[in-house]
Amino acid sequence: ELAALLANSDALVVEDDHSGDIASGALVSLGKWLPQRTVHIRSYSKSHGPDLRLAAVGG
């Protein structure tokens, strides 16, 4: 439903996945429906400790 609304705009989607690899559920991303306009940022600070700030960016 959200992807359908965004499809008719020029908006870019930035997803912030703060749970990284510790999330138990499957990854759900708007990139499935809007791959050319979605950037997914995944943080690893929760799984590797708050003192270590790591992130991976994919589009």
Image (cartoon, rainbow, N blue to C red):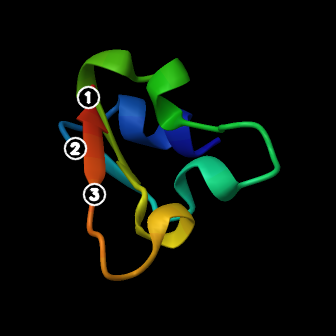
Q: Which residue is drawn at 55% across and 63% down?
A: 47
Residue holding disc 1:
37
Q: In which quarter of the image is residue 29?
A: top right
Q: Is mark 2 on a helix, strand or loop?
A: loop
Q: What element carries label 1?
A: helix
Q: Which amino acid does label 3 sit on?
A: Leu
Q: Distance between the residues labelled 3 and 2?
A: 26 Å
The answer to whether residue 41 is left or right of residue 21 is left
Label ID, residue 14: none
Label ID, residue 11: 2
Q: Which of 43 and 48 is in front in this view?
A: 48
Q: How many labels does the image show?
A: 3
The answer to whether residue 21 is left or right of residue 42 is right
Disc 1, disc 3: CB below 8 Å? Answer: no
Which one is closest to the eye, mark 3 or mark 2?
Answer: 3
Q: Is 6 placed above or below 58 here?
A: below
Categorize mark 3 by other alpha carbons within 10 Å: few (<14), some (14-19), many (20+). Answer: few
Along the polypeptide, which appears first: circle 1 or circle 3? 1
Which residue is situated farthest in the bottom direction here? 51
Categorize mark 2 by other alpha carbons within 10 Å: few (<14), some (14-19), many (20+). Answer: few
Where does the N terminus fall, quadrant-wise? top right
Q: What residue type is labelled 1?
A: Arg
Q: Residue at x 66, y 37 (%)?
A: 27
**Residue 19 coordinates in the image, percent (x, y):** 57, 62
Which one is closest to the eye, mark 1 or mark 3?
Answer: 3
Which one is closest to the eye, mark 2 or mark 1?
Answer: 1
Q: What residue type is labelled 2?
A: Ala
Label ID, residue 54: 3
Disc 2, disc 1: CB below 8 Å? Answer: yes
Q: Can you see residue 30?
A: yes
Where does the C terminus fall, quadrant-wise? top left
